[in-house]
Every structure is written in C-alpha cells, then in structure tokens.
Amino acid sequence: MTIEKAVLGTMLKENYLISDSIVRPEFFEDPRHQALFREMRVLQENRTVVDMITISTAVNLEAFGGISYLYDLQSYASAKKFDDYEQLLLEQWKEREKCNILTRAKEEDWSIQQVTTALDQLNEAKLDDHFSISMALSEVYESPWQENKAVQGVLSGLKRLDQMTNGFQAGELTVIAARPSMGKTDVMLHFAKEAGWRSFLPIIFSIEMPYERIVQRMIASTGRINRAKLRNPKDNLNSEQKKNWATVIGRLSATDIQIFDGARQTVAEMRAKTRKLVYQFPERKPIIFIDYLTLIRPEHHYGGNLHLQVSEISRQLKVLAKDMNCPVVLLAQLNRAVEQRQNKRPLMSDIRESGSVEQDADVILFLYRDTYYHPDSDQKHLELLVAKNRNGPVGVVSANYNPFTGGIDDVNH
C-alpha cells in the first residue's frame, strides 16, 4: 500500500495532480483509499482546496485512523517522483485486473477471443505511448541507405484561412470534419508542422494511426515525396530525394512535435500527458491535435448511448482547451448521409454522433474534394468550408492538396 499512500500524499500537497493524473478510484486496492480519493475529487470539482481541514470536514477520518493518517500520507509525498508513483499504481491495478479477468474467464468459461479482448483492453491503459519527433525521426534517418525492414493564434499556413480565423486561438475547440479519404489527417499534420515551425508545441494524440505512419506522412509531405515510395526508401527514392533527406529530417525535427499513439485514450489521460509536456517545454505554448472524436474513450458508458458519450467528450475537450489555455483541434468523421445527396458538400447535421459538438466547437471546418466524387471535375482544389466561426466570418478557403504526398499549400503558390 506504500505506492497508494505516496500517490494520495503527493496529491494532498499538490492539488493540481488530482485532475491532471489518469488515476481513477479503482486503481487503489485499499477501499479506504478509494473513498478518500473520491472525496478529494469531489472537493476539487467544487473548487475547494484539498487539505487537512477540508478533508477532515468531508470524511469521517476515524475510519482511517484519525488526522494522524493524513499526516502519515503526506510523509510519503514527492512531486518529483509522482510520475513513477502513478506508473507503479497503474501497473499494480493492471496486475490485479488481469488476475480478475482470468478468474472470471475460468468461472464463466469464456472463449479465447473473450479473454484476449479483455486483456487487450486492459493493456491499452498506459502512460508510455509517447514519442518525440526527434526520437521517431532518428529511427528512420538512415532508411534511404538501409535494406527495408518488415493573441494571434497559431497560424495554419493558409493565408485565407488565417484571415478568417486569426489562427487557432487559445481556449478554443476547432473541429475538422470530413468523410474518409478527404485528407483530414494530412490537414491536421500540416497544421501541426506549421505550429511547430512557429515555436509552438504541437501535441498529437493519434488514437487511430501508429506514430510510425504519422512520421512517414510528415516526411512525405515535407519532402514532397510520394508516400508509396517510403515503404522502401532505399530502393524507391531517387538520388535527389536521398540528397535532400537530411534537410527534410532536420526541418521536421525543428517542429518538436510530440506524439501519443495509445488506443482508446480518455480526455483525462490526454490532460495528464499534456500537463507533463508543458512542464517539460516551458518555453513553448502547446496546441493539441486529436485524431479522432469517436475513438476517444468516454469516462462513462451511458448504456452504450454514443450520442451521450460524444456529448461528454466534446464538453471535456472544450474544458481542456480553456483550462490549459491552448487550442484544441479535433478531427471528426461525417456520417454516410453525405453520400446520399447530389450535392455532397457537408452540413452541420452530417457530423457523426454530433451530440453537443456543434455547440461546444468554436470553429468547425469541413473538408471537401470534388475530384473524389467526380474525377473529371474542373474543381481540383481542396475546399475548407468554415461552417462555424464564433469570432469571425464563415466561408470557403481553397487550398492545393496532393493526395499522394499529403502536401498542402495556398492556391496562389
């Protein structure tokens, strides 16, 4: 129980860790610690300082051994070691849960598929899915020569869009929505690179795509290289592309992009990871990118009601943007209703399981490429439809988009 005491004791001294941690009541094995942590969260949610006095008035401390127990907890506190405490607490919980899963599987005669699924979901809860762009790029630096192995806001780099929105604003939630294959991820990565080159700290939560593919896409768009070539750079890149490789890697490394590619992350987990990076990079203001909405794990199941789950998540993301005082850019899928219409340009009602997304978002951008539906169309550009802009005009921004490299720039370039 020492780790549990250390976590609670540190939270008593540093209250911000109560909400900026991924810790949940069930992570504690001792029922007393579960109850104490719940009360600490209630106090903080009510914007009350969590200390000896407030806890002693909210909880019957006799069950814990009196006020001396709180002093005992604080003796274990260490803010510098909290990340280690948090990781150990998570690992202890996962070990108990694994035993519980195997016991239930035996008692209820689960299939192998049921057991595997349950264990996979348990394993998704992690803190170590973080890769800096420098770390990721170092892994691919030599690949062209190796055998292939199996106030003003944050500007977007698109002048017309920046004129309309004044960039991505701190405290605001921007939703970028489109049907599959319209270029959502490429647009997000373009915005992330532009932010990094302007000395912001882009933090990408890629819930769908592993970090290796994210890095590969950024290399392709930055170096204007067909993505298919990067499956085997040694054989596929021409001499000019190999000559420019180090320059492309250097430009990308300068963005300081941070990538988390854990599956089914909660908003609370994203908040905790962002907070740690803010302390690590005090000179850079963060901007958060999330790919994408319905892959975020909600805190509550709501009986499987996706509408309520998405509403909870969009509210939490808006709060995250305000609390962290940074822009949050969220990708979202559109439902299939678009495909049934003759005019396939998206509408607000097309956002899948929209819930309160329309209300919570400060800016909503739809992406549309006419050539996707009509290959012979004269309209070759990617359209960014600014459908909602709380603090500015709405309208259409056209951009050049190369679906083979993922490159995006202004039409007048």
Image (cartoon, rainbow, N blue to C red):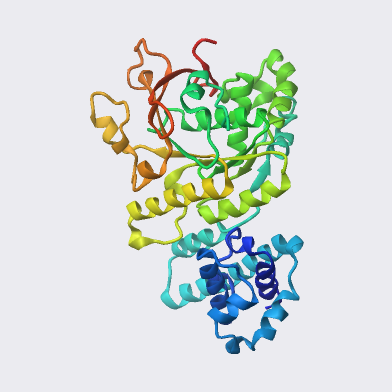
Residue 284 appears left or right of 357: right
Q: Quadrant of the N terminus?
A: bottom right
- Residue 109 screen position, x and y as percent: 42, 73
Residue 287 visible at all: yes
Identify the residue at horizontal 51%, vertical 76% (top origin): 103
Q: Nearer the viewer, residue 93 or 318?
A: 318
Where residue 271 appears, as percent x and y from the top left, is 57, 52
Image-based side of 134 in relation to 61, left or right: right
Q: Where, by quadrant of the figure, is residue 153 drawn?
A: top right
Name the residue located 45 percent from the left edge and 48 percent from the top edge: 295
Is 291 rendered above or below residue 5?
above
Q: Is residue 231 visible?
A: no
Residue 327: image x %, image y %? 54, 39
For residue 382, side relative to residue 30 (left or right): left
Is residue 156 or residue 119 the one in the foreground? 156
Image height of 80 relative to 350, above or below = below
Instruction: Indicate the quadrant containing the C terminus: top left, top right, bottom left or bottom right.
Output: top right
Q: Residue at x 55, y 85 (%)?
A: 60
Q: Position of residue 137 (x, y in %)?
A: 70, 34
Which residue shows up at 69% across the image and 68% down it? 13
Left or right: 51 as drawn, with respect to 339: right
Quadrant hosting residue 363: top left
Q: Quadrant of residue 32?
A: bottom right
**Count of labels in the image:** 0
